[in-house]
Image: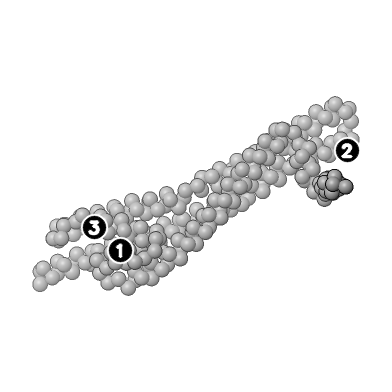
Amino acid sequence: MGCEVPLNFKWKMEAVLNNSIPLVQMVAQSDVATVVVLCILAVMSLGSWGIILVKYITYKRNQRANAEFFRKFTHVQQFVGLQVLCESAEDSALRRLTAEVLKEASKFSNFVSYDSIQHRASLLEDTIQRSIEGLRLVEDKYLVFLASSSNLAPFFGLLGTVWGIMIAFFQIGQHGSADLSVVAPGIAMALITTVAGLVVAIPASAGYNYFTSCNGQNEISYFNFGSQVLSLFKRGDLLALEEVAG
């Protein structure tokens, strides 16, 4: 009696695999080369979806944090007020950009002259440029995996298909018959890798294009924000000069 349940369960599982899930049955009957290709595509798929999900969550979080930081930034009237803003704001790309500018500005002398004002602004402009490039590198991280998956997955699928068709024709030669019952299973198993390659490539390509576009838009917004920070600094230097002249 104790063995009846496992045996019944085994028979039910075999019935399900044989009747309801032909794809699983074809994969189970595939040769080693096809299974290797499918495993490679599975790794690409898991990696691509993992990157897409993590990137999307990070992107949305960063967008909310940037929007909140910029909202507070619009109320800052003087360059020195940015220090308080950075200390109270949550982490974001704009906060890190502002922190780099403040770090560079802290190295400047407290004395401003008409000769040094342009050089001071130029140094901050270089800092903004480097900081934005660093932010872009961080945001583009792992996108190369999506690009590689979208480009290579169809070729892996094609490789598996060509290999499967070769095996199918070899089996035809062995059986000495081109009957559909002989050809169809091999061709069907060969086409599995093509389908798998497209399943991997389509979301990977879509994710790569989406995040590349988003990162490009972010870069433009970072430069615009950096320009506003630089203007705030220049305005402070000009006011200091006017006070001295007055």
Q: At which x and y percent is residue 35?
A: 70, 37
Instruction: Decide which of tag 2 and tag 3 comes sooner along the chain.
Output: 3
From the viewer's perspective, is residue 176 above or below residue 65? above
Name which quarter of the figure residue 64 lies in: bottom left
The label number, if any, that marks residue 105 in the structure image:
3
Task: Give the quadrant of residue 62.
Answer: bottom left
Q: Label 3: how many residues lie within 10 Å, few (<14), some (14-19) or many (20+)?
A: some
Please report whichever mark, 1 or 2, sits nearer to the chain's N-terminal start. Answer: 2
Q: Which mark is residue 181?
A: 2
Checking the image for residue 104, the label placed there is none
In which quarter of the view is residue 82 placed?
A: bottom left
* Residue 84, percent from left and from top: 29, 67
**Secondary structure category for the residue under label 3:** helix
The residue drawn where x is 32% and y is 60% is 98
Amino acid type, label 1: Val
Q: Which residue is mark 1?
A: 229
Q: Are marks 1 and 2 in contact (CB under 8 Å)?
A: no
Q: Residues within 10 Å of mark 2 (few under 14, many from 20)?
A: few
Q: Nearer the viewer, mark 2 or mark 3?
A: 3
The residue tagged with tag 1: helix, strand or loop?
helix
Indicate the amino acid at tag 3.
Ala
Please name the amino acid that badge 2 sits on: Ser
Quadrant, the C terminus: bottom left
Q: Secondary structure at mark 2?
A: helix
Residue 69 vertical position relative to residue 208 in the rendered view, above or below? below
* Real-space Cα separation, disc 2 to disc 3, in angstroms: 78 Å
